[in-house]
Image (spheres, rainbow, N blue to C red):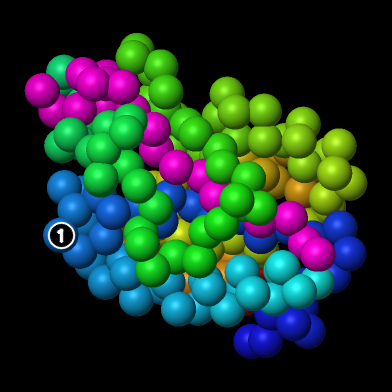
Amino acid sequence: MNPDTLLQDHDALLLVDVQNDFCPGGSLAVPKGDTIIPLLNDWIVSARRNGNPIIASRDWHPVEHVSFDMRGGPWPVHCVQDTKGAEFHPDLDIDNRVVRVSKGTHFDQDAYSAFDSTGLGTYLRRANIQRLWVGGLAQDVCVLATVLDGMKEGFEMHLIRAATRPVDEAQGEDALNRMKDAGAILD
């Protein structure tokens, strides 16, 4: 799959949560999460060359966020604002042209989707974006929520299947089926 031949006018690249805490060695590591980075970097280069917007979402939690197990949530502490774990993986080719979307920023509310209380849908419509190419972490959590919400927002959603990894393989397969059944295109 060659991004140079796939990216068109009115397309954007959406990178979901490719952060240190979700990669090997992180507090909530996705197995082989870092293996998607070279492919995502190829897409980034193509999007830059073609003039397509690039958006990178990130978990950006305050200390003592409601999703943390110490607060009764389902997850270990992860992606706390201004920590090394919350940074984008250093091998991901992020520069100052990439639009950063922070989610999960409220103490009392979790957010899995890049569209959840971020204004992303409005931003994309103003930029006349119609189709999104999505990769990132984790396939069965935030990528799934982002793809489903993007479709609800009216965008044509394409999952770059090789550029995402699940927390759990069985749940990853279920997530792929849910995205496909909802109308997403799995590339």
In this view, the residue in front, 45 or 12, is 45
- The quadrant holding residue 60 is top left
**Residue 112 screen position, x and y as percent:** 44, 37
Residue sticking out furthest to the front: 96
Q: Main secondary structure of the magenta part?
A: loop
At label 1, the amino acid type is: Gly
Judging from the image, what secondary structure is the residue with disc 1 in?
A: loop
**Residue 129 screen position, x and y as percent:** 83, 50
User: Can residue 187 be spotted in the picture?
Assistant: yes
In this view, the residue in front, 21 or 143, is 21
Circle 1: is it few (<14), some (14-19), or many (20+) Cα within 10 Å? few
Q: How many marks?
A: 1
- The quadrant holding residue 14 is bottom right
**Residue 97 screen position, x and y as percent:** 66, 53
- Asked whether residue 54 is drawn in magenta, I would say yes
**Rendered-image quadrant of the C terminus:** bottom right
Residue occupying image coordinates x 89% and y 46%: 128
Vertical arrangement, residue 74 with respect to residue 8, above or below: above
Q: On the image, numbered disc 1 is attached to which residue?
A: 25
- Asked whether residue 39 is drawn in magenta, I would say no
Magenta span of residues: 51-70
In this view, the residue in front, 52 or 75, is 52
User: Can residue 140 be spotted in the picture?
Assistant: no
**Residue 4 screen position, x and y as percent:** 74, 82
**Rendered-image quadrant of the N terminus:** bottom right
* Left or right of 145, for residue 18: left
Residue occupying image coordinates x 42% and y 72%: 37
Residue occupying image coordinates x 67% and y 86%: 2
Residue occupying image coordinates x 59% and y 65%: 159
